Image (cartoon, rainbow, N blue to C red):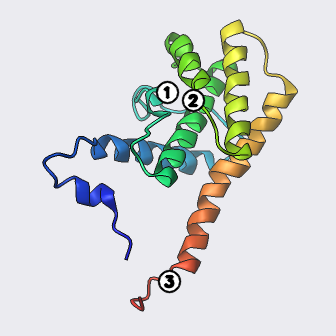
């Protein structure tokens, strides 16, 4: 049986892991995916600063998490940042604008281990460049928006559904 350290560590006096913050980030990523599931692309007109209020660029490299959770949070935060940038690029708002430079710095430090994450990172960098230079959305970025939606938003729900099929929860362990 696999032990979930997230729930075990919270009872240890020496655990310095902020599991509440990790769950807040996961919650926001899942809500983002849920809200974006009504579209076929990345759409940024969301409740920035109220519902989504964390500095997601600060959670891009949580090395102390296991690989699966670390990658989910890193890539989810990148989708979150891309969505914030899309709000700005669409002239729907400017929540991320005061943090563009710090966001660029955080994103530039990332090292990806697979092509899917690398493509996501490149989309975020392209969107950051457009936001900083105040240029229009290039066709390539619009196409990447659709790809990010398919791979991350739809991909999240497909993965969850597959796991239900693989891990039958009928009491027969």
| CB contact under 8 Å: marks 2 and 1 | yes
Residue at the location (70% across, 50% down)? 151
Q: Residue 97 at x, y = what percent?
A: 55, 13
Residue topped by disc 2: 81
2 vs 1, front mark? 1
Report the Cα–Cα distance between label 3 and label 2. 35 Å
> Residue 117 lies in what quarter of the image?
top right
Say which element carries label 3.
loop
Q: Position of residue 143 (x, y in %)?
A: 82, 36
Please tell me which residue lies in front, 132 or 88: 132
Which residue corresponds to the image point at 41% horizontal and 47% vertical from the top-left? 65
The mark that comes first in sequence, 3 or 1, is 1
Mark 2 packing: few (<14 Cα in 10 Å), some, or many (20+)?
many
Residue located 53% across and 39% down the image: 74
**Quadrant, the N terminus:** bottom left
Residue 90 visible (yes or no): no
Distance from Cα at disc 3 to Cα at disc 1: 36 Å
Front residue of this view, candidates 83 and 172: 172
Mark 3 or 2, nearer chain start = 2
The extreme bottom residue here reads: 172
Left or right of 154 in this view: 106:
left
Image quadrant where one finds the C terminus: bottom left
Residue visible at 66% across and 55% down? Answer: 154
Pointer 3 residue = 168
Q: Which residue is mark 1?
A: 57
Question: Please, is residue 69 above or below residue 21 in the view?
Answer: below
- Tag 1's secondary structure? helix
Does label 2 or label 1 sit earlier along the sequence? Answer: 1
Q: Is residue 8 left or right of residue 73?
A: left
Distance between the Cα atoms at labels 2 and 1? 7 Å
**Few, some or many C-alpha atoms within 10 Å of disc 1 (few <14, some 14-19, many ≥20)?**
many
Based on the displayed image, in which of its 4 quarters is residue 163 positioned? bottom right
């Amino acid at each position: 049986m696999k032990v979930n350290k997230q729930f075990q560590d919270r009872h240890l006096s020496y655990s310095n892991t902020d599991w509440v913050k990790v769950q807040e980030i996961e919650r926001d990523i899942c809500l983002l995916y849920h809200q974006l599931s009504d579209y076929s692309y990345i759409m940024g007109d969301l409740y920035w600063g109220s519902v989504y209020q964390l500095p997601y660029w600060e959670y891009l490299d949580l090395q102390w998490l296991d690989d699966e959770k670390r990658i989910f949070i890193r890539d989810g935060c990148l989708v979150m940042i891309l969505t914030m940038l899309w709000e700005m690029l669409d002239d729907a708002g400017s929540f991320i604008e005061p943090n563009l430079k710090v966001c660029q710095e955080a994103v530039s430090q990332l090292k990806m281990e697979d092509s899917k994450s690398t493509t996501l990172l490149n989309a975020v960098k392209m969107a950051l460049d457009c936001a900083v230079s105040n240029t229009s959305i290039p066709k390539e970025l619009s196409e990447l928006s659709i790809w990010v939606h398919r791979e991350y938003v739809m991909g999240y729900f497909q993965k969850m559904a597959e796991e239900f099929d693989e891990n039958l929860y009928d009491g027969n362990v």
